[in-house]
Amino acid sequence: MTPALRAHGAMFLFSMLVAGSFSLGVLIANDIAPMALNALRFFLAAVVIGAVAGLQGRLRRSHFHAPWRYLVLGALFAGYFVLMFYGLQTAEAVSASAVFTLTPLLSAGFGWLLLRQVTTPRMALALSVGAAGALWVIFKADLAALRAFDIGRGEIIYFFGCIAHAIYIPLVRMLNRGEPAISFTFGTLVAGAVVLVLVGWGDIAATGWTSLPWLVWVGLLYVAILASAVTFVLLQFATMHLPAAKVMAYTYLTPSWVIVWQIALGHPAPGGLVLVGIALTVLALWLLLEDAAKPKPKPKHAEIQS
């Protein structure tokens, strides 16, 4: 299996795990301050990743030169998660996950600005279809709300987090200097934890940790280990083998996974009109994967050599 195919598989799993954080996040977002939750989340994820990397002999001093790189990446990803949980205090899980599907379009723009990654016409079409599907879900298939641009406060807050996420994707490739994905992830997690402790110490100190509902601890462990430690590695690996826009294309699966999670947790499925928007996001993913699967033409010098 080629590294590119493994990267696609990594992002498929990524989309499923990330979806769970939306469904569980809605349940716990109002029980703990986002700064406090994510500070502990980053710390626990760093411990897990650090232990695995240490056992594999992947933690070397040379991997952590120019530590400012990790501070930049850690601050961006920490900001994304904090804004996500602030948004989930009022946004519904499905509509928030639809906001997340706007990230590929943003990521394509930042990929061009930072790395000069070019978006093909087919990719541009796919990103546009996906964005249309996301907007359809965000506005709950209400054309009047769409025309008035009547969007919820939680969705707006989370959108700014998605901008931070979109910048993070091409920066991983830009700032990586050959470090393995797992050690690069560890550095990012530690830096993110430091930033969150410094910025959110007031919330951390004010949290009654011993009186938190058990569901908060379940959600915290999920987002720390599966939706942070595991997805960080998956994302770091994929960004080293796929363009930024294609990496984030897998976010188009997130609303579909969220619906599965919501049904599993006992919530009703969304209405038929909203499902039209979900279908558009899946179509966008298919368009991008078809584009990725097409064989690239051989350069002329290769034909001469043969």
Image: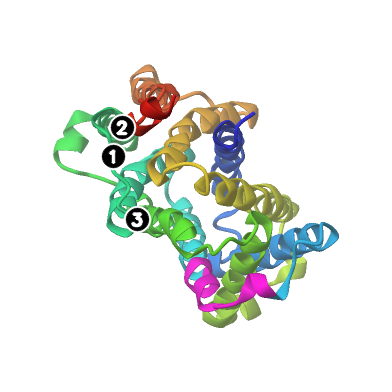
View extreme (left): residue:
147
One can see residue 152 in this view: no
Residue at point 63%, 74% (across, down): 64
Disc 2/disc 1 C-alpha distance (Å): 6 Å
In the rendered structure, find residue 115 and report the number of the disc placed on it. 3
The answer to whether residue 196 is above or below residue 212 is below
Which amino acid is tagged 2?
Met
Residue 79 in the image: state x and y as whole percent: 46, 65
User: Would you say the residues marked 2 and 1 are in contact, meaning their CB atoms lie under 8 Å apart?
Assistant: yes
In the rendered structure, find residue 123 and report the number of the disc placed on it. 2
Total numbered badges shown on the rendered structure:
3
Crowding at dot 2, Cα within 10 Å, few <14 / some 14-19 / many 20+, comes out as many
Closer to the camera in the image, 103 or 50: 50
The quadrant of the picture occupied by the N terminus is: top right
Label 2 sits on a secondary structure element that is helix
**For the stretch drawn in magenta, what is the main secondary structure?**
helix
Whether residue 117 appears in magenta in the rendering, the answer is no
In the rendered structure, find residue 119 and report the number of the disc placed on it. 1
In the rendered structure, find residue 66 and report the number of the disc placed on it. none
Residue 143 in the image: state x and y as whole percent: 19, 29
Which region is colored magenta?
62-74
Which amino acid is tagged 1?
Thr
